[in-house]
Image (spheres, rainbow, N blue to C red):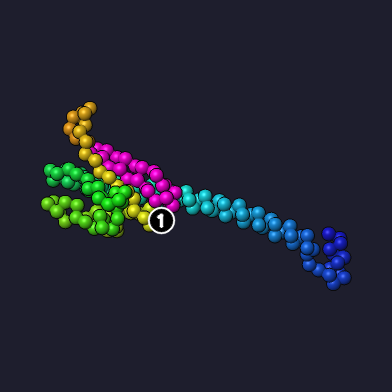
Amino acid sequence: MIKKIKNYKNGKHGFTLLELVVAVSLIGILLGGGFVRYSKVTRSTQKERNRANMVIIQKTFFQYFYRMHLNGNPHFPPTPLNDNTVMDSTWCSTVIDSSMALTAPNHLFANKSVPKNNMGNPFSYQSFVTPDTIQGGTMYSIEIKDIDPDSPTNGEIYRFSI
């Protein structure tokens, strides 16, 4: 400290090269840790968004099922007939049951679009009708799966039954 004051009086002021290297190193370490934390938080947020979108699809399809049940014809939207049963734009705009109403899967959602994953790719969807051997009657099920290899929820499957 005394040396710095002495140098300042002699007209020499500033930082030494060692002080600058230490300061830049510390800043680099702090930024490096911040970037790692940011990427973890971003990935976690994307996962939660995808999971929420799958639950939104489930709830909306169950509302449709209940509405159709009240009309005497309980059913979920049909399984897409494309590769991997993906809810692509063609399936989303195709009428579900023309004998009941001219409703397409897109029309079931408030924003008129079936939710997609964080990468903008559609989920895979299947509906099943199986006999319920325990209680008798029929069991209706749906399965929503993220098949996008770049998605943080790749391979996660949500199954819901009624």
Q: Quadrant of the C terminus?
A: top left
Q: Which residue does the numbered mark 1 point to in the structure image?
A: 119
**Residue furthest top as drawn:** 134
Q: Is residue 129 above or below residue 17?
A: above
Position of 45 with respect to 72 (left or right) is right
Amino acid type assigned to the residue bearing label 1 in the image = Met
Left or right: 25 with respect to 122?
right
Q: Nearer the viewer, residue 124 or 14?
A: 124
Secondary structure beneath disc 1?
Answer: loop
Residues drawn in magenta: 140-162
The residue under the point 47% across, 48% down is 44
The residue drawn where x is 69% and y is 55% is 26
Q: Rate crowding at label 1 as few (under 14), some (14 to 19) or many (20 or more) other CA atoms within 10 Å.
A: few
Residue 43: percent from the left, percent from the top? 48, 51
Looking at the image, which residue is at 50% across and 50% down? 41
Outermost residue on the front side: it is 83
Residue situated in front as seen by the camera: 40 or 111: 40
Looking at this rendering, what residue extends furthest in the bottom direction? 11
